Image: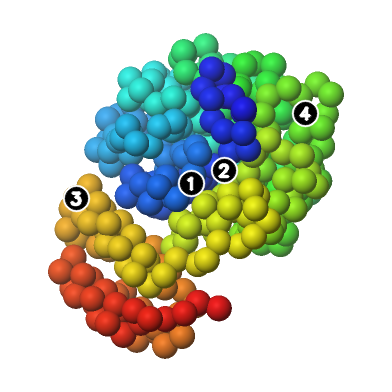
Amino acid sequence: MVKIGDVEIAEFPLLLAPMEDVSDPPFRAVCKENGADLMYTEFISSEALIRDAAKSVQKLDIYDYERPIGIQIFGERIEAMRDAAAVVEKAEPEILDINYGCPVKKVAGKGAGAGILRDLPKMQAMTEEIVKQVDLPVTVKTRLGWDTDTIQIVEVAKRLQDVGIKALSIHGRTRAQMYKGVADWTKIAEVKNHPDIHIPIFGNGDIDSPEKAVEYKDKFGVDGIMIGRAAIGYPWIFREIKHFMKTGEHLAQPSIAERIDTCKRHIDFSVEWKGPRQGVFETRRHYTNYFKGVTGFKPYRTRLVEAMTLEEVHSILEEVHNEFGDYEFK
């Protein structure tokens, strides 16, 4: 059983990655019911959190069915990160996660996210302050390095472990790669297999099928796998991986009826949580992908993207059920 501090997760946990504008409560709900063992919130700005900014505070919303869950924060100022950690602790998650991996310019360019990989002493000092501040187990998500010339991921892992983090998730790309190219899991394995590393190491990057999940589990020896983009519009990937790990066989793809049911519950929750306009708008990236691969679906996809109200979406989904109810996935 993998444990993060005193928090038991699973024998070989599948984690939902923290993704901005993606990993909100409605999306986490459908991932949890499909087998995600540990989920993280969208990243939350430490500066916004200590200013009590409404949108950032809302991201602290967690529900009992999600547990165990981690809340992730990011920022460039040590004091702000420490104070934000105290705010997070009051929301009572099981885990506090630090984002040292976000590659986008507006974050990394200021020295937050992956930007801190250019200043390991500061990264170590910041982490130590956060660990001291809270009683929660602290975890970190990071990348291999800033670029291929500055990969020091084993040193990063040692420093973070030394100041008390309880688990480390590593995306197998550098900041310079963004999301391009292939994730290098050999570097993740170097951390996992290093004799001085004893905390759980989770691998992240390019896991988009049950076969690849099993292959990478066996080949690189990580303690668990974190899944990000492959879960967008396809939360069933968690249960499919678990079934394949257990039986070596593929689980049947979700039927049209199940996709519609999941889509409806997702958007209903989103509207309830965010309001009618934002709920519909911000869920589009999910519910249009729920039907990816369905031949002849394009006209309905266009209509779903253009739909402005919950009632419109539900009406279109009823049409989808009537049109594709007997569709057979290959």
| Label whose residue precedes the other's in the sequence (3 or 1) | 1
Q: Which residue is mark 2?
A: 14
The amino acid type found where label 3 is placed reads Glu
Does dot 1 land on a helix, a strand or a loop?
loop
Locate the C terminus by quadrant.
Answer: bottom right
Locate the N terminus by quadrant.
Answer: top right
Q: Residue at x 18, y 65 (%)?
A: 310
Q: Check whether the beta carbons of the residues at disc 1 and disc 2 lie within 8 A of each other.
A: yes
Say if residue 55 shows up in the picture.
Answer: yes
Front: mark 3 or 1: 1
Front: mark 4 or 3: 3
Q: In the picture, residue 151 is in which quadrant?
A: top right
The amino acid type found where label 4 is placed reads Glu
- Measured along the vertical axis of the image, is residue 292 above or below residue 200? below
The amino acid type found where label 2 is placed reads Leu
Q: Residues within 10 Å of mark 2 (few under 14, many from 20)?
A: many
Does dot 2 land on a helix, a strand or a loop?
strand
| Label whose residue precedes the other's in the sequence (4 or 2) | 2
**Mark number, residue 295:** none
